[in-house]
Image (spheres, helix red, strand yellow):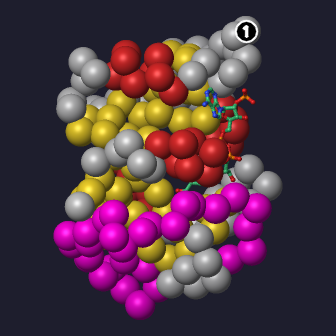
Amino acid sequence: MTLSIIAAISINNTIGFKNTIVWNIKQDRIFFKNITKNGVVVMGRLTYESLLTKPLINRVNIILSRNKHFLAKNCLIFTNIKDMLDFIKKYDKIFIIGGSQIYYQTIDIVDKLYITFIKKNYIGDTFFPKIKEKKWKLVSEYIFNSEYSFREYIKK
Ligand SMILES: NC(=O)c1ccc[n+]([C@@H]2O[C@H](COP(=O)([O-])OP(=O)(O)OC[C@H]3O[C@@H](n4cnc5c(N)ncnc54)[C@H](OP(=O)(O)O)[C@@H]3O)[C@@H](O)[C@H]2O)c1
């Protein structure tokens, strides 16, 4: 089983504003789709709502919510991270897809980070945790153009 985080972040670590993503980068959406295809995606309830409450197709969708009554069609709901981690053990490819609350709670337990790095400052209200150099090794960077690149990090 490989547990990864996938996120798009700006220079100032912004990931979102008012429960939406502030940039519109088609290549990033393609990258996200290709990497997560046929895997399991785990997200917080707010991120799920930002997707207009539709599950992502061709993926097992898991939502974290502390609300025991929360339901979402064709999605699995967990009320805590521990139970979610126990459940996903049987899968090969698991991706934590956000948002900020979930990234902060899982960055220390994932094996890999897929980061679209956007070389611009954005005003935001949700942020990605600091990627600490002593913990993470940058193993590849595909510089798509002068505005963004796709980075892969593995845990040191
Ligand atoms: N740039 C990117 O790559 C990217 C990716 C994803 C999302 N985003 C952005 O991130 C923002 C949303 O992030 P966010 O931090 O506000 O919200 P979030 O992490 O998506 O969801 C937070 C919710 O998750 C649930 N939750 C959190 N910790 C939990 C736990 N330990 N156990 C069970 N449930 C738990 C709670 O739901 P309940 O309140 O229901 O209990 C909480 O309100 C949006 O702007 C979105 O567009 C950006």
Q: How many marks?
A: 1
Which class describes the residues within 10 Å of circle 1: few (<14), some (14-19), or many (20+)? few
Query: What type is the residue that disc 1 sits on?
Result: His
Residue at 42 percent across and 34 percent down: it is 41
List the residue tagged with mark 1: 69
For the C terminus, the quadrant is bottom left
Answer left or right for 110 relative to 46.
left
Image side of residue 15 versus residue 5, left or right: right
Q: Is residue 148 left or right of residue 52?
A: left
Is residue 54 a member of the stretch shown in magenta? no
Residue 139 within the magenta-colored segment of the rendering: yes
Measured from the top left, where is residue 147 in percent x and y?
A: 46, 85
The residue sitting at 37% across, 16% down in the picture is 87
Q: Considering only vertical position in the picture, is 8 above or below 45?
A: below
Where 155 falls versus 119 (above or below)? above
- Classify 128 as above or below 57: below
Give coordinates of residue 140: x percent, y percent: 21, 72
Q: Which residues are magenta?
A: 122-149
**Ligand number 1: quarter of image:** top right
The answer to whether residue 152 shows anywhere in this view is no
Position of residue 152 measured from the top left corner of the image (x, y, whole percent): 28, 64
Identify the residue at horizontal 40%, vertical 24% (top origin).
Answer: 85
Query: In which quadrant of the rendered view does residue 95 lie?
Result: top left
Residue in the foreground of this view, choosing between 8 and 68: 68
- Quadrant for the N terminus in the image: top left
Dividing the picture into quadrants, the one containing residue 16 is bottom right
Taking the view exactly as shown, the residue that stands out farthest to the right is 18
